[in-house]
Amino acid sequence: MQTKFAVPLFLFAGSCATVRPPSVDFLARAEAVPASQHLLLPSSQRAFAAWQLPADDPWVRFSKWTLLSSLGDQVSSGELPDIRQLRLVERAERIGARLAEPGLPSDTLWIIDLRGAAAVALGNAMSHAAPHPVSLIMTFNNWPAESELIPAEETLAALVTLRPRLPELGVLGSRPVFLLDAWRLAYREQEPDEALIDNRYYLTSSDFPEPAQLQERGIRRIVYLTETLGTDPEHSVEEDDLHETFLRYTQSGLQIAMLGLDELDDPQPQVVITRRRFYIPRPRPTLVLSPAFYARSRGGFGGPRARPTFHGVLHRSGHGG
């Protein structure tokens, strides 16, 4: 694999060994980006239609279309990573279907913070297995690039090859499931090579519903699902860009349950969730407030303007974050 970094740097000031956001351990367990396969790529409008929530869906305004916008105006040929080679995608589909088949609680919002393709696969499986409508909310806010730092093309491949079951117009009670890409803050302690496009990004509180909006919809609990809680679950925390949002949620009386995908490899994952203790975030320094992190991102988070290339087949200008 090509070296992505100039020199490793130290953790930002104020970090603590007992605090472990998911991206700290992400690369240690991440599978290699799979080989590409030839695909017939849909137009951006056709891709939008496959994922577009109904206009009256209460969660529709939180969906981000950045990644799908990198597709062209016409159907075209291209190459994207073969996500079926990822073991995590298979696990995510299996667990998503098992979770949703008996029904998802009506008072729960899900935040799925997995490798992008796996988050899409899990949400897609939920939408097909659940006996009620499921609203999948995409938060992917970067573009693919020929020399990309993180594999946005992998997430895009999942979006164009999987088709969720969408809620119907006028149907109430859809369960909200936010899909996040765990790659978005990867390589947090290192400086990218100058030849790479830094297409990482972070989310803010404005990317999620306000506590009052959730409570008005009957949401009382948030389930935050990552790949694993690491070797020290008791000291695991939410990803740094979710910290402010989680603080606001708990301060408003909403409950947060934090889970690792490993815990849901169980014949009855719903039972595991009901047994799980609630997580209460405490104020802490985060990466998104660290000047050193932005300095390592070469002049601004997201860096120069990226160009999604699909290996030279499709060209369309875009941005990195």
Image (cartoon, grey):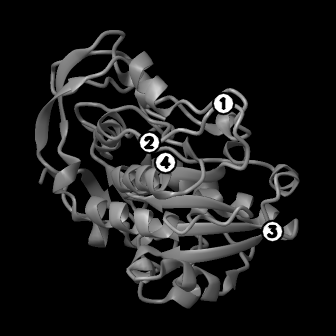
Q: Position of residue 136 (x, y in %)?
A: 55, 45
Q: Are marks 2 and 3 in contact (CB under 8 Å)?
A: no
Q: What type is the residue that disc 3 sits on?
A: Leu
Q: Is residue 286 left or right of residue 121?
A: right
> CB of mark 3 within 8 Å of CB of mark 4?
no
Foreground mark, 1 or 2, reads 1
Residue drawn at (35%, 17%) of the image = 43
Label 2 vs label 4, nearer the camera: 2
Of residues 136 and 239, the one nearer the viewer is 136
* Residue, disc 3: 254
* 73 vs 39: above or below: above
**Mark number, residue 294:** none
Q: Which residue is mark 2?
A: 164
Q: Earlier in the sequence, mark 3 or mark 1?
A: 1
Q: Earlier in the sequence, mark 2 or mark 4?
A: 2
Which callout, 2 or 3, points at the residue further toward the start of the chain? Answer: 2
Q: Are there few (<14), some (14-19), or many (20+) residues within 10 Å of tag 4? A: few
Q: For this view, does 123 lie left or right of residue 79?
A: right
The relative height of residue 146 versus residue 257 in the rendered view (above or below) is above
Mark 1 — residue? 169
